[in-house]
């Protein structure tokens, strides 16, 4: 292993050549290649990204990452991932050393931040998730690392990358602006009987202008989830399989905290074998938070074997009695569901859509158009349910008169 700091580029080049590993800068020192050392490649990869404008991981190369990677504070970087970046399955190390995020009690393998960063190249990020899926089945408080976290970053593009076997969330955008994910294939699937739980494709938090497009997601929790303060977000042209759907929320969970989701578009989504299709969920009850969901558009969803294809739940994890006494203080307004097709799973029998708002007009301007959802034929014709909301749009009649509670 070569020494990382206080050495000249010539020294690094010499060392890298001698060792046949690590980051070798080219003649002008701007473009580097990182190859596998046989040991922990984390420090060499971090060092290369800090020193070089462009860093390449060649095809057929698997970097083994045994130590957490802090790539924050970067500027104008291009990471060309042709090979694989694979995190070790040393759970003890990661539990004790992963980057900690207070929000939802999370840890992370790898944080990327700064300005103007591109990660692309057709390569793979592998989280060695199976040991975590199995351990979580025996310990439901086990901290598990997020695969890739974009943290305090502006102008980031992550393109043409496979993300496989993340132990928990796959992507976390935390305090990011102008972040694009394009052409990402996610697979978080357990090979044992223990499921790959909490493997959300994306979670967005305190971030503005995030685009997720042209991606395939095969996982065990939300396909895309907008957590508090997600503004100007696009999640489109997605194939989601096995997930919990495209979710806004849950919001309003924490007392004293105000959560915003505004300007979200999700169009052209294929949702298969999922718990939900398009969903907005907000807490009600005593001692929770508040917020606003405003200007959300879900359109062209094609669904197959989905438990709840179209959902607003504004009494999330709250009993009807409590929701009546303490309606949600997360107001939901200007939401459109347009062009939904497909067949539910039958888990909720004939119900294919449910707009369950809190009492006291906490939902407004909710529109449904061109909705053609059906349950499996054994459940007869579709039931559309709603409460405490005035539904508009050309499919409003399907919902009939909503229950007022
Ligand atoms: C993805 O990367 C592979 C390997 O570098 C390349 O052949 C392919 O053209 C890239 N695809 C896109 C859409 O950029
Ligand atoms: C569960 O995992 C956590 C580490 O995330 C650890 O602190 C705790 O002791 C474990 N619990 C059990 C019952 O093993
Ligand atoms: C993702 O999967 C699609 C469809 O199978 C494939 O065309 C594409 O090349 C894959 N992308 C990557 C980064 O491997
Ligand atoms: C989709 O998910 C189902 C179960 O959730 C699984 O059986 C199937 O193999 C997955 N399909 C693909 C293409 O990964
Ligand atoms: C969301 O943004 C609002 C307005 O800036 C702020 O008051 C609130 O604390 C933020 N909420 C979170 C969860 O960061
Ligand atoms: C709603 O959000 C979309 C982007 O998702 C934006 O183009 C549109 O201008 C917004 N509408 C309003 C009234 O803010
Ligand atoms: C939502 O979009 C509208 C129209 O583009 C814009 O005026 C407004 O500032 C956006 N809201 C947020 C929170 O960015
Ligand atoms: C209802 O919501 C739609 C979609 O966001 C918006 O275009 C429209 O202006 C809203 N209508 C009212 C009356 O606010
Ligand atoms: C429905 O609209 C009427 C007329 O604007 C209003 O009085 C009522 O409160 C609305 N109901 C709900 C549940 O929002």
Image (spheres, helix red, strand yellow):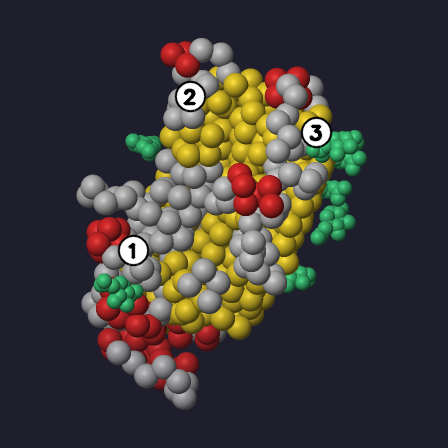
Please state the horizontal and vertical placement of residue 325, each as a whole percent of the image.
Answer: 60, 45
Residue named by callout 2? 349
On the picture, is 123 further left or further right than 204? left
The residue that appears at 63% across and 54% down in the rendered structure is 290
In terms of depth relative to the viewer, which is nearer, 12 or 381? 381
Please state the horizontal and vertical placement of residue 399, each as a whole percent of the image.
Answer: 61, 21
Label 2 sits on a secondary structure element that is: loop
Label 3 sits on a secondary structure element that is: loop
Local packing at callout 2 (Cα closer than 10 Å; few below 14, some 14-19, many 20+) is some
First of labels 1, 2 by sequence position: 1
Residue that protrudes farthest toward the bottom in the picture: 6
**Contact? badges 1 and 2 (CB < 8 Å):** no
Mark 3 to mark 2 CA distance (whole Å): 24 Å
- Is label 3's Cβ within 8 Å of ligand 9? yes
Give the label on residue 210, or none.
Answer: none
Label 1 sits on a secondary structure element that is: loop
Residue named by callout 1? 140
Look at the picture and state if 142 lies above or below 365.
below
Looking at the rendered image, the quarter that the N terminus falls into is: bottom left
């Amino acid at each position: 292993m070569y020494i990382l700091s206080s050495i000249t580029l010539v020294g690094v080049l010499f060392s890298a050549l001698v060792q046949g590993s690590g980051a070798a800068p080219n003649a002008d020192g701007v473009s580097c290649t990182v190859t596998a050392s046989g040991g922990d490649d984390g420090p060499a990869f971090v060092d290369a990204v800090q020193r070089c404008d462009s860093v390449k991981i060649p095809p057929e190369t698997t970097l083994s990452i045994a130590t957490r990677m802090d790539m924050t504070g970067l500027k104008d970087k291009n990471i060309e991932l042709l090979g694989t970046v694979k995190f070790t399955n040393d759970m003890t190390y990661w539990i004790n050393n992963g980057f900690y995020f207070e929000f939802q009690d999370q840890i992370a393998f790898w944080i990327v931040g700064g300005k103007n960063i591109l990660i692309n190249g057709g390569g793979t990020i592998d989280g060695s998730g199976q040991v975590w899926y199995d351990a979580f089945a025996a310990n439901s408080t086990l901290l598990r690392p997020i695969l890739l976290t974009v943290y305090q970053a502006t102008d980031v593009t992550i393109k043409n990358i496979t993300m496989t076997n993340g132990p928990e969330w796959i992507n976390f955008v935390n305090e990011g602006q102008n972040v694009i994910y394009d052409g990402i294939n996610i697979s978080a699937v357990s090979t044992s009987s223990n499921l790959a739980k909490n493997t959300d494709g994306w979670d967005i938090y305190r971030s503005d202008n995030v685009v997720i497009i042209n991606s395939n997601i095969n996982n065990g929790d939300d396909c895309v989830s907008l957590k508090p303060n997600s503004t100007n977000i696009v999640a489109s042209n997605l194939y989601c399989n096995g997930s919990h759907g495209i979710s806004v929320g849950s919001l309003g969970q924490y007392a004293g905290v105000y959560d915003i989701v505004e300007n979200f578009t999700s169009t052209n989504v294929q949702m298969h074998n999922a718990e939900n299709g398009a969903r907005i969920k907000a807490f009600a009850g005593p001692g929770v938070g508040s917020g606003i969901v405003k200007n959300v558009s879900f359109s062209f969803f094609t669904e197959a074997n989905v438990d709840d294809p179209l959902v607003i739940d504004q009494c999330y994890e709250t009993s009807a009695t409590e929701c009546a006494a303490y309606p949600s203080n997360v107001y939901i307004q200007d939401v459109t569901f347009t062009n939904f097709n497909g067949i539910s799973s039958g888990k909720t029998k004939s119900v294919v859509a449910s707009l369950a708002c809190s009492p006291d007009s906490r939902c407004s301007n909710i529109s449904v158009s061109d909705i053609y959802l059906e349950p499996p034929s054994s459940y007869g014709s579709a039931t559309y349910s709603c409460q405490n909301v005035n539904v508009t749009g050309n499919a409003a009649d399907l919902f009939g008169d909503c229950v007022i509670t």
